[in-house]
Amino acid sequence: MQKEKRKRARVAMSPLAGAVYEILRERVKSADDPRITYAELARDLKDISESFEHITHRSQELYAALCEVGDACKKRSLPPLPALVVRADTKRPGDAYYEGMPFKYRDERVAAWQRDLEAVRKGRFPALTPARRASEGQLTLARRASEGQLATAKWINRC
């Protein structure tokens, strides 16, 4: 059991995914409605670091980071923090959030997201330590992906 806990605590994230995780983690603690739009998340990232200046609400790199955060939450048996990130027009996640869900109908998928959102609101998310963040090389790889130098499908398929 102790060994399994240590294993879960060592999930590494890229600097971008780590920043996304921390932004979402803070929103859970501080807001009645912790949802955030993709555009707001991109703006918050730009405020954190100049290295995220190129991130927009439509960046494949942002979507890849959200997948990475979702994977890290799953590995730690935490509710999926990416459930907080929504479209401005519908106040629901984009289509990519629902990919891989076993539900055939939109109503079922929306209900599953609402359950995820409620679980996130009630969840407790540990702070990241620098040891859990990935190397600068992984950030460079992610940046190259957002610039179209790597196939977007590689990132999407990873999720």
Image (cartoon, rainbow, N blue to C red):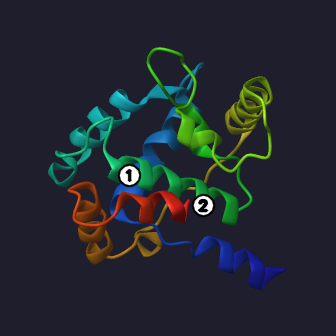
User: Residue drawn at (52%, 54%), measured in percent from left and top?
Assistant: 67
Question: Where 148 falls versus 60 (above or below)?
Answer: below
Mark 1 secondary-structure assignment: helix
Residue drawn 79% across the image and 46% down it: 102
Count neighbours of disc 1 (C-alpha within 10 A) and say few if under 14, some if 14 to 19, many if 20 or more. Answer: many
Quadrant (top left, top right, bottom left, bottom right) of the C terminus? bottom right
| Residue in view at x 34 percent, y 63 percent | 151
Report whether 159 appears left or right of 47: right
Residue holding disc 1: 19
Q: Which percent across, then down, holds residue 146?
A: 27, 55
| Residue in view at x 44 percent, y 75 percent | 131
- Mark 1 belongs to which amino acid? Ala
Label 2: which residue? 71
- The percent position of residue 73, horizontal first and vertical second, equals 63, 57
- Number of numbered labels in the structure image: 2
* Residue 76 falls left or right of residue 94: right
Q: Nearer the viewer, residue 94 or 21?
A: 94
**Left or right of 132 in this view: 10:** right
Vertical placement of 15 versus 52: above or below?
Answer: below
Are the residues tagged 2 and 1 within 8 Å (C-beta)?
no
Outermost residue toward the top? Answer: 89
Q: Amino acid at mark 2?
A: Asp
